[in-house]
Image (cartoon, rainbow, N blue to C red):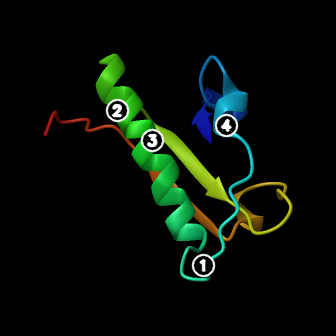
């Protein structure tokens, strides 16, 4: 998971970026990259709710097998953007 970092592009998310990087292994073929991203986003949104930090701008990238160089190598990427208008 990454967060925007101005003109430098993206950087690892949060104060403990290793918490949001790692491997998730599934046995069911239906539990694909989109499923894995949903697990990560659910955990993230729960953390935001519990800590009261509110939604933040992040990008979740899921690769199959080895981690790629960026989202262009990903099996699935989802970007979460905070509500700008407050809705």
| Tag 3 near tag 1, CB within 8 Å | no
- For mark 2, give the secondary structure: loop
Mark 4, secondary structure of its residue? strand
> Does residue 70 appear in the picture of this structure?
yes
Mark 2–mark 1 Cα distance, whole angstroms, equals 31 Å
Sequence-wise, the earlier of marks 2 and 4 is 4
Q: Residue at x 37, y 28 (%)?
A: 48
Q: Which residue lies most toward the front here?
A: 27
Residue 21 at x, y percent in the picture: 71, 41
- Outermost residue toward the left in this view: 87
Residue most toward the bottom? 29
Name which of mark 4 and mark 3 comes first in the sequence: 4
Q: Could you tell me how far apart the alpha carbons at marks 1 and 4 are, in whole angstroms?
A: 32 Å
Q: Give the mark nearest the N terminus, 1 or 4.
A: 4
**Residue at 29% across, 28% down:** 49
Q: Name the one closer to the observer, 32 or 73.
A: 32
Residue 19 location (% of width, % of height): 66, 31
Q: Is residue 48 left or right of residue 35?
A: left
In this rendering, the answer to whether 72 lies above or below 22 is below
């Amino acid at each position: 998971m990454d967060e925007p970092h101005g003109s430098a592009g993206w950087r690892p998310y949060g104060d403990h970026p290793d918490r949001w990087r790692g491997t998730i292994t599934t046995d069911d073929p239906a539990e694909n990259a989109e499923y894995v991203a949903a697990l990560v986003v659910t955990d993230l949104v729960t953390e935001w709710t519990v800590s009261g930090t509110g939604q933040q701008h992040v990008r979740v990238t899921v690769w199959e097998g080895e981690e790629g160089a960026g989202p262009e190598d990903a099996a699935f990427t989802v970007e979460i953007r905070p509500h700008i208008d407050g809705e």
